[in-house]
Amino acid sequence: MEKIDCHSSTPKQDLIDFVEKHKGKKINIHYENNIYYIWGDDDDFTYDTSIEKHYMEILDTIEKHYIHCIKCVG
């Protein structure tokens, strides 16, 4: 399973490139929800990037949230 672990200085373009490399596959993304101002407001979701709507949603999530990890899961 390929994955990219992220930290505060990970460029968003690296994450976008990872998703682009695995387009057409299922991608799991672990991220902060940004709903509360506390640590641990995180969640994960699996997107099927072969579905255009899911592909656009994952790019939107990368743009708007702090990402912990992205994995190609299938």
Image (cartoon, helix red, strand yellow):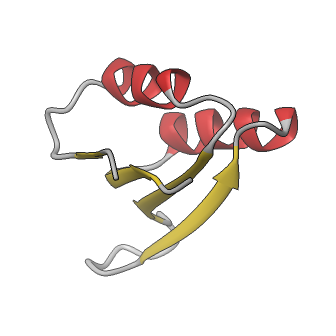
Compared across the picture, whether 4 is left or right of 48 comes to: left
Q: Is residue 5 above or below residue 44?
A: above
Q: Is residue 58 above or below residue 14?
A: below
Question: Observer-nearest residue: 22 or 44?
Answer: 22
Instruction: List x then y, in percent, for residue 50.
Output: 78, 36
Question: Observer-nearest residue: 71 or 38?
Answer: 71
Compared across the picture, whether 36 is left or right of 54 comes to: left
Quadrant location of residue 58? top right
Q: How many marks?
A: 0
Question: Observer-nearest residue: 28 or 44?
Answer: 28
Q: Is residue 38 above or below residue 30?
A: below
Q: Which residue appears at 60% of the width and 33% of the height?
A: 59
Q: Is residue 31 above or below residue 25?
A: below
Quadrant location of residue 36? bottom left
Q: Which residue appears at 59% of the width and 66% of the height?
A: 45
Q: Which residue appears at 47% of the width and 63% of the height?
A: 34
Instruction: List x then y, in percent, for residue 62.
Output: 49, 39
Instruction: List x then y, in percent, for residue 73.
Output: 50, 57
Instruction: List x then y, in percent, for residue 67.
Output: 36, 50
Q: Which residue appears at 16% of the width and 46% of the height?
A: 7
